[in-house]
Image (spheres, coloured by chain):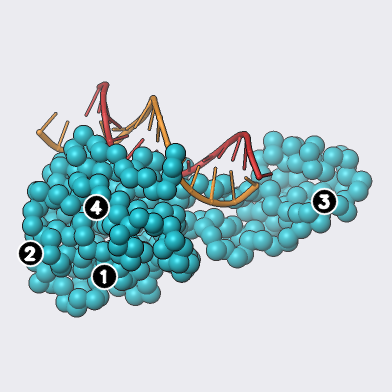
Chain colours: A cyan, B orange, C red
DNA sequence: GCCGTTACGGTTGAT
DNA sequence: ATATCAACCGTAACG
């Protein structure tokens, strides 16, 4: 019930988590970092007190997409039956009342109203004819309601499809786009103490309060800094997505609101990405462990590199193949760390 | 022991 | 304003 953030529950390993919600980015990042340092997943799981299934999932996703961020939660998929499409269907039907749904589908493609990725199925077209167009005599009304003709472009949000079609339609979505730049600055701080011990994590209070849990905003929020180095090139898959959706702006604001209890409200703001952030608490320890070298490497403190970026694909459907793709590079590239 | 997978109970957000 | 629904979450447990 209460949602607010709820503090979390404790898993078998002693780690705190909030059921139904993504792990804080700070932890996600650490998972990736530790993996890059060569720590085995099972050890990462134990050290961070995150279930191995989750570690596995996060690493697999990172290898695949280059992003550490969780996927987009909630919302609805973009509808293929945009007002514009419905309108075209109506026009076709009006022009030829005897037209078959499959013919309409072909015309939508032929006329460029839809591309193969977003063309409605024949059954959808039939439904549209039945429900929205019905007898097609009086078009007027409907339009008004659905009218926004173009919609799509404004995307502030991830799923947008160009309804007009983009070239190649390729990618579609851009989900949460994301790039994060994170940094690893965190550690700096104190905590380092135990690697294994990592108590910080365990303490619910710490977590809840301190960081992360952001109350609302999903994470991709912030994020991308223009600067990510090179990372992307890496795999080549796609990277284009740089969209910028930044929503974090407001986030901060509301965040503060939300985060009530947090003692350190500030800390969490956007935690990770914003660039500022820094929360320091809990995660911090990485330093000890992880970084021996990074520390050294870190050149500029502030620069933290980007860790991940990329989009997560929304095409979940097709994504099924796990890792394989890039792996090594991924690794190397990781957060900029290497390169820069 | 390790790890990929998946059922489960959960949250979210657009419609 | 409420309810649906589909997307995602992490844990736990199976193999």
**Circle nearer the viewer, 1 or 4:** 4
**Circle nearer the viewer, 2 or 4:** 4
Q: Say if residue A29 shows up in the picture.
A: yes
Q: Position of residue A208 (x, y in %)?
A: 30, 51
Label 1 in the same subunit as label 4: yes
Q: Which badge, 4 or 3, is on the more N-terminal residue?
A: 3
Dot 4 lies on which element?
Answer: helix
| Quarter occupied by residue A318 | top left
Task: Identify the disc placed on residue A228.
Answer: none
Q: Is mark 3 in CB contact (under 8 Å) with mark 1?
A: no
- Residue of label 4: A206
Find the distance from the CA under tag 1 to the CA under tag 4: 26 Å
Question: Could you tell me which residue is drawn at 8 percent across and 57 percent down?
Answer: A193
- Residue of label 2: A292
Q: Is residue C13 shown above or below A314?
A: above
Label 2 in the same subunit as label 4: yes
Label 4: how many residues lie within 10 Å, few (<14), some (14-19) or many (20+)? Answer: many
Label 2: how many residues lie within 10 Å, few (<14), some (14-19) or many (20+)? Answer: few
Q: Which badge, 2 or 4, is on the more N-terminal residue?
A: 4
Find the distance from the CA under tag 2 to the CA under tag 4: 25 Å
Q: Is mark 2 in CB contact (under 8 Å) with mark 3?
A: no
Label 2 in the same subunit as label 3: yes
Q: Residue furthest right?
A: A137
Q: Quadrant of the C terminus of chain A?
A: bottom left
Q: Which badge, 2 or 3, is on the more N-terminal residue?
A: 3
Q: Position of residue A298 (x, y in %)?
A: 16, 73
- Residue of label 1: A305
Query: Image check: A80 left or right of A111?
Result: left
Q: Is mark 1 in CB contact (under 8 Å) with mark 2?
A: no
| Quarter occupied by residue A162 | bottom right
Q: Position of residue A116 (x, y in %)?
A: 60, 50
């Amino acid at each position: 019930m209460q949602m607010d953030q709820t503090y979390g529950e404790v898993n078998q390993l002693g780690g705190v988590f909030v059921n139904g919600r993504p792990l804080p980015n700070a932890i996600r990042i650490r998972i990736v970092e530790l993996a890059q340092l060569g720590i085995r997943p099972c050890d990462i799981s134990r050290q961070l007190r995150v279930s191995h299934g989750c570690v596995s999932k996060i690493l697999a996703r990172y290898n695949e997409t280059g992003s550490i961020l969780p996927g987009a939660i909630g919302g609805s998929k973009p509808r293929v039956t945009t007002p514009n499409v419905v309108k075209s269907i109506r026009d076709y039907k009006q022009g030829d009342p005897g037209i078959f749904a499959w013919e309409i589908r072909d015309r939508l493609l032929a006329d460029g109203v839809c591309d193969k990725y977003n063309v409605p199925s024949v059954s959808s077209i039939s439904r549209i004819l039945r429900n929205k167009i019905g007898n097609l005599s009086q078009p007027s009304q409907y339009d008004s309601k659905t009218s926004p003709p173009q919609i799509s472009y404004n995307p502030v949000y991830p799923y947008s499809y160009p309804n007009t079609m983009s070239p190649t339609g390729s990618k579609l979505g851009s989900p949460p786009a994301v790039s994060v730049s994170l940094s690893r600055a965190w550690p700096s701080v104190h905590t380092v103490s135990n690697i294994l011990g990592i108590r910080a994590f365990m303490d619910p209070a710490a977590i809840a309060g301190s960081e992360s849990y952001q109350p609302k905003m999903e994470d991709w929020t912030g994020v991308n800094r223009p600067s990510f180095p090179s990372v992307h090139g890496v795999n080549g898959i796609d990277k284009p997505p740089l969209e910028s959706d930044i929503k974090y702006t407001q986030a901060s604001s509301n965040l503060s609101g939300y985060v009530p209890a947090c003692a350190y409200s500030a800390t969490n703001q956007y935690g990770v990405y914003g660039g500022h952030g820094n929360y320091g608490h809990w995660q911090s320890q990485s330093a000890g462990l992880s970084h021996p070298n990074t520390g050294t490497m870190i050149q500029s403190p502030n620069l933290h590199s980007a860790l991940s970026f990329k989009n997560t694909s929304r095409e979940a459907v097709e994504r099924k193949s796990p890792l394989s793709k890039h792996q090594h590079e991924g690794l190397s590239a990781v957060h900029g760390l290497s390169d820069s």
